[in-house]
Every structure is written in C-alpha cells, then in structure tokens.
Image (cartoon, helix red, strand yellow):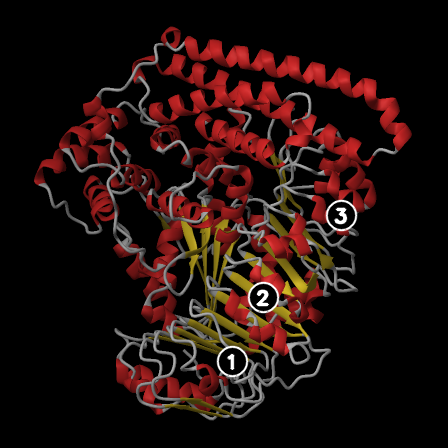
Amino acid sequence: MADVLVGFLLDNLTRLLSHEANLLLGVEDEVRTLKDELKLTHSYLKSFEGKYNHHHQALTEEYISQIWDLVHEAEDVIDEYVAFDFRKQGYSFWESVKSKYYQLTVRRRVAEKITNINTRFNTLYGNRDKFRIQEPNPSEVSACAEASDSRKRLPIEETDVVGFDLEAKMIIEQLTKGKAERDVIPIVGMGGIGKTTLAAKVYNDPIVLSWFDHKAWVVVSKDYSVRELLEAVIKSTMLLTDEMKKMTDKELGLELRGYLRGARRYLIVLDDVWETELWEKIQHCFPNNLRGSRIILTTRKKEVALSANPSNDPHYLKFLTDEDSWKLLCLKVFGKQECPDLKLEDPGKQIAKECGGLPLAIVVIAGVLLKKEKTTRWWFRVSSRVSKFINEHTERCSEIFSWSYKDLPHHLRPCFLYLGLFPEDHEISTKQLTLLWLAEGFIPEKEQMSPEDVAYDCLEELADRNLVQVATQKFDGSIKSCRIHDLLREFCISEALKRKFLAVYRHDHSLLPGNSRRLGIHSNPLQCIGTNCASSNLRSLICFEHNDDKRLSSKHWKLLCKGHMLLRVLDLWDVYVDDIPNEIYKFICLRYLRLKSDSAVTLPLSVCNLWNLETLDVTAPLIERPTINIWKMRQLRHFYFNGEAVLAEPPKKMIKEQDYLNNLQTLSSISPDSCTWNALSLVPNLVKLGIYGDIEKSKSLAFNNLSKLQHLQKLKLMRDRRYQPAIDIPSSIDFPSSLIRLTLSQTQLIVDPMELLGKRLPKLQVLKLKDGAYSGDMLNCTQGGFPRLEVLKLVNLGVTNWKISPGSMPSLIRVVINRCSGLKGLPSSMQQMPTLQELQLWYPNVLVAECARKIETCKGKDQFKLLINHAENGDDMH
C-alpha cells in the first residue's frame, strides 16, 4: 500500500512543479530531487507488489512501514510550506516587508528538511538487502496471477443461499400461513453466519413478494436511532411528509401505527438488532391488525429474540456442514454448486472445511480464489495456509480476513481499509465512495479509462472478492450503493489504526491517536471538532452523525481553519452548517468539499480559489443565485449544487487560446443562461449536465448550445417553480448523439415528449419524466421511437391516456410508474413487448393495477416481475 502513497505524493509534486511553481519558490531544486527519489522508490515498490518473501514478513513489514513514515513526513513538509507561501500572498506591503526575513528562514528550514528526507530515502533504498527483500520467484508470481472474471453481476435478489434451505422453507410457511395475528419471527446466530442472507432470500421470494401489501427492510446496528428507524419504515410503507419530519418520535410512531393498523398485510424486517431495549421502544408501532402481518428480526443475542417472541422458538442458524461449505465455495468461485475440475476437489474441500462452517469466511476466501488461476498448486498453497489458522471462530475469521487483505493488489488495500471510516451497517453511496477514493489519491491511472471508471472497477473487484456487499443496484446491474459486514469493518479499523491510516470517533472514545491521517466522526461531531482530540496530522475529516439541534457555527469553522489547514477531504454532509465562511479558501490542499445546510447560506466567491479542488458538493436553500468562477479551478471534476448556480463569464484569454477545462465531468446544476457558447465550448469532456431555473426564458441558450458537448451522457432539465411553466422545446434542437440518460422535471412541456424526442435520441437508455414534466393528458409512443430505451420512469404526471404503437421502444426492460393517479390504464400492447421484464407501480389506482396483473398473467410470473407498492384506500395489491 505504500506505493499508493508514494504515487499520490509524486502526482502532487508534478502538479505543483508544472502549474504552481511559484508556491515552491526557494525550494524547487530540493523538491525536484525528492521527486526523483520518489520515482525510484515507486518503481521498485510497484515491481515488488504482492511478491514479498513470506519467510521474512516481519522485516518486510518494517521496511514498508519506514517508507510509509517517510512519505508522510515529506507530504507534511511540502503541504505546510505551500500553505505558508499561499497565505503570504494576501499580505499588505508592510506585512510583506516585515515577514521577508521570516520567509527566508522558513525556506532554509524547509530546504534542509527536504534534503534530509532525500538522504533517508536514498539510504532506505540502499538497505533492501538488510531487510532480506528479494526479487520474486517467477513461478510463484505466475501462480498468483490474476484471472479474469467475465461473469455479469447478478441482481441482489438472485444471489443463492447454501445450507439454509430448510430454514428458508419453514420461515416462508410462517410468513404466509398460520394465524392472522401479527407474528415476530426471530433469526439468531453469530456474526457472519448468514442471518441477513437468509432473511434476504425469504424477503425476495416470489411467494412472499406477492403475499404482503407493504414491505420494509431496516438495518438497525449497534448505534441505532429510533427516529431514523421509524423514518426508514415510513419511507418504505407510506409517504414521509414534511409535516412528519417535524413530529416528535412518539408522534411519528403513532402515525406509523395508525397507517399500518388500517393497512392490509405488512412485512417488516429488522436486521441486526442488538438490544432488547430497541424492541421495547418500537413494538407498539407495529399493530396487530389481524391480517397476517409479520416481522422478521435478526440478532446475535438469544435474549433479544425471546424478548420479541417469548412464545415460539427462534430460528438458530448453525455452522454449515463440510458438504454445504464446499457447495458455497464452488458457487462463489465457479458460479455453480459443483467443481468443474476434479483435481481441485481435494484442496478445495480442505479449504472449505478449514473455514469452520462460517459463510462469511468461506465467501471471503472464495474472493481470493476467484481472482487467481484455477491450479492445484495455488489451491494447495491456500489450503496449507488456511489450515494453520486456529480453531476459535472469531480469531479464525480475523486470520482469514488478514490473509485476504494481504492478497489484495496494493492499490486496493487503502480502498478497502477506507471503508472502516463509515458507520456500522451504513449504506455507502458508490458515487460518494469513488469520489472520496479519487480525492485521497488511491486510484491508479489506466489508459483510455476515466479515473471515475477505474475507481468503480476497484469497487467491483472488492465486491467480487466478497469484501463488500452490494446494497442496491442500478437498472443495468451496476452497484448503486454498498455495505461492509461489521466483522470486516472492525478488521479494517484495527488494521488501519496500526498503520496510522484512519481513526473513528465514537461515543465510547475519549481520546484518539494523535497521528491519524483520516477521521470518521460517528458521535458528537461538534465536541470532536471543538476539542484538541483530533489529529494535527489530519488530512481527511468526514462527519456522519446528524442532529438538527447541533450546527457547525463560525466558532467551529475558526477551529477547523486554525488546526486543520492541510485537509484534503472535508465532508460535513451530516452536520448542518450555519454559514460557509469566506476563509474557506485557506484550505488550499482541499480536493473534496461536501456541505449541507437547511437554512439560507451564501456560497462565498473565495471557494473558487481552491485550485486543488476536484469535487464541490453543496446542498442548501440559498437566497441568491451564486456566481461560480469555475475557470480558476483547473482540477475541478465534479460540481454538484441543488439550486441555480451561475457560471462566471469565461476569461477572454481562455476563449482565445481555447484553454479547456478538460478535467470537468459534472456540472449540476447551473442556470440556463450560463449555457453560453463560450462556456460550453471550454468544457468539452462534460459527461453530466444539470440545468435548473427559468428554462423557458433562456431556452435558446439551454438547448441550442448543447451540441458542443459531444461526450455528454446524462442531462437533467429542471424548471424552478417560480418561473413560467409552459416550455416549448425548439424542434431544431440538436441533442448530443452521445446522450444515454435524460431527466425532465417540472418542465410542463407543451408538446408530447415521447413524440418530440423519440426519434431524436437514438442512443437514449433511460428516460425520466417527473413532477409535471409534461402538461398534456396523452402520451403517444410512436413506431420506431427510442430504439435503445431500456428504462422508462413516469413520476407524478397528469397524464390520463397512454398509447404505445407496435415497434416503439423495442429494447424496453423496466417501467416505473409513481403517483400518476389520473392514468386510466396501461397500454395493452405492453403484453406483446418481448423485452419487457419488470413493472413497478407506486400508488396506482384500481384500473392501472388491474392492467398490470393482466400483463403479468400474459407474460408469466417466471418471465415478468410485477411490484405494486404503497396501496391506498385498501386496494388489493401485490
């Protein structure tokens, strides 16, 4: 993993020497020498990756640790000097005169420090033999070579379960048969035994899906919040309104209880309950409506299960048999429950047996085998190493995790350990995670691939290795969000603490290591920021706890500015900020900034002086349209803003010299009048664009200049409700041919968008019409329209009639209809669409629901998935 740190510092120095050499005035020669030393070290570490001598592992680890410490020291010296040199640019004349002698002193000290670091790098490289680091045996390298895996990621609900067939059958019977009274079904077992997997198999069973009218899955975890739990159930079973958000916990519980009492049949899964206290607090929210409602509860503790249902025995999950362990290993490695190569059976069965029947350990080891050549030599090697692990299950699991971690390519190790920053059972957004990895410098460059795509591939590989769990997927099967098992997460934290890589601030922590580079705050964020417990070496600060009563004030900003000027990552999304100070520009090393507020704040112009910034993500109800001078932010890749940001006019010099912002990938959202020819011509690699505001007034700009964006894939058009509603898209509009996703929201189009756009967007795969996107009452999908469209979402439209002509949308796979209450039915031609596989209905009326069932009957339940959610007025729903 040290090579990743060296590579990051190399990139940083290259960027400084190329674009900001003035900030290194007086120490350029020393920095160039440091860069040469880092190149040598980096090259050696890359050739050394994954090939160190296991017989001298302690010495090897010590060698890597010394490199690690030296890189951190070099990073600190460079960053501190750059920050110092940047601050003096704001000095007045007399301040500059007074500080001149001090500047010379600082430069001399920094030059001496860098020279000393260079000498130590050179010495360390020369001492390779002392640490018994040798070049690897070629045959050993080939045995460890990665094997490609071309299997397409399966939808989450299709993931197989091994060894729990009898338990699954029994639970399904309990869910769908028996008494009408509400019943609680506990599943008990140790961590990693498969409780969640079994519950998910049952929850997604077709019989169960069609039996219950309302379903909700809630992950509880140790540090649960009753409020968050109630809101999660409400979001899945009814509509969480603004009025509900203002209720007390008690009032919210009564609201949920009242709704479920009047509902038909509901199923709630409470996953990973740790304390009996939780059930005592919330059980009254789930009424006995005498309609066969059920609650599945997974827990590690017998007393929790008996507290929830003292009259029936829980389902106690046992360790897998040797036979089932071998089947699970085969399933994860080969995609089926049998081994295609008889020579691999003996070592394979030994590997499975040594995992002690613990499914989590088996799938983690399978992740190692999956990425290697399927040779008996390699499998016997794995078998011999696993067989050395001790018998106690928790320690055995830890050993397996450690070995799987060390088997990771070096660039994946920091990516994996980074997951320890997130709270237990936290659903991690793929977008957030990959952008954080990029800002941290973990992601290597690959030819003909964007950094974002490389980062996603890293997540895919961790998922393939079963080190992360896929939580949700997009329509194409790609990972939308993920989780990490709590046992693996604890391993990440433990391993990261040893390496000073990260620390976590929780309610049970009074102190933190003073040398951690990254900090995840899970409790009392303001207290943590307001005291001196946070590391002075901190480079990343991420807050997760949300509390409406606690806000980041100007006082806390001053503390941040004073103590943590060298931050690269600052994510305060879960801590509302009262304001964004002008002093934000002082965080000169910042690469990732994510802020949120529920009150009107002003985005200061000084944020544009953050020349290292790669991601800027701000959500707040701002009073005015902020002006963003992105042209000064040469490294910016993603700009997210929930309102109407105005782009400053590009400098004439940039326009004349065609000085493009080639890095910029996302602008969402900006005002329509910002979409000038000059502005869009300077962002040629833009992939995602969001336009928000008075679209009708500036439609000539918003539409006519889009042709400049030849790499644009995703476009969102959103009208601000304050402006004129009726929008007439010009018939001459020239959409980029690369567009694959289009969202229209509140646009109140006059012309039917299906007729208007169907033949002008030949590559479009996803179309979303939301919240009054179209003002008419008829949707007409004409023949030959949208030839590649796979997903169609209609949300909160006033449409009453819908027609699909034969030959329209020939690639359509999924249709989602949400709150289109006026719709008089569904097109009968949907029954004859051969590619259609899924229909989701939210709050449908009786006519639409009946049409949906006819489509399901015609296509067959084995070939077609119908989901009907949020039934109202007692309609008979699936």
Looking at the rendered image, the quarter that the N terminus falls into is top left
Foreground: disc 1 or disc 3 = 3
Left or right: residue 601 compared with residue 5: right
Name the kind of residue labelled 1 in the image.
Answer: Tyr
Foreground: disc 2 or disc 1 = 2
Q: Position of residue 185 (x, y in %)?
A: 42, 58
Q: Position of residue 175 (x, y in %)?
A: 38, 66
- Which disc number belongs to residue 606? 3
Whether 768 is drawn above or below 437: the answer is below
Q: Is residue 653 among the parts visible in the rendering?
A: yes
Whether 286 is drawn above or below 149: the answer is below
Per the image, label 2 sits on a secondary structure element best described as strand
Distance between the alpha carbons at the discs numbered 1 and 3:
46 Å
- Please tell me which residue lies in front, 185 or 404: 404
Q: Earlier in the sequence, mark 2 or mark 1?
A: 2
Q: Residue farthest to the left?
A: 342
Name the kind of residue labelled 2 in the image.
Answer: Gly
Q: Is residue 221 among the parts visible in the rendering?
A: no
Residue at x-position 40% and y-position 48%: 449
Q: Residue farthest to the front?
A: 656
Distance between the alpha carbons at the discs numbered 2 and 3:
23 Å
Q: Name the residue beneath numbered marker 1.
A: 843
Per the image, label 3 sits on a secondary structure element best described as helix
Residue at x-position 40% and y-position 24%: 43
Q: Position of residue 809 (x, y in %)?
A: 35, 80
Left or right: residue 831 compared with residue 261: left
Q: Residue farthest to the right?
A: 94
Q: Residues within 10 Å of mark 3 (few under 14, many from 20)?
A: some
Q: Name the residue beneath numbered marker 2.
A: 690
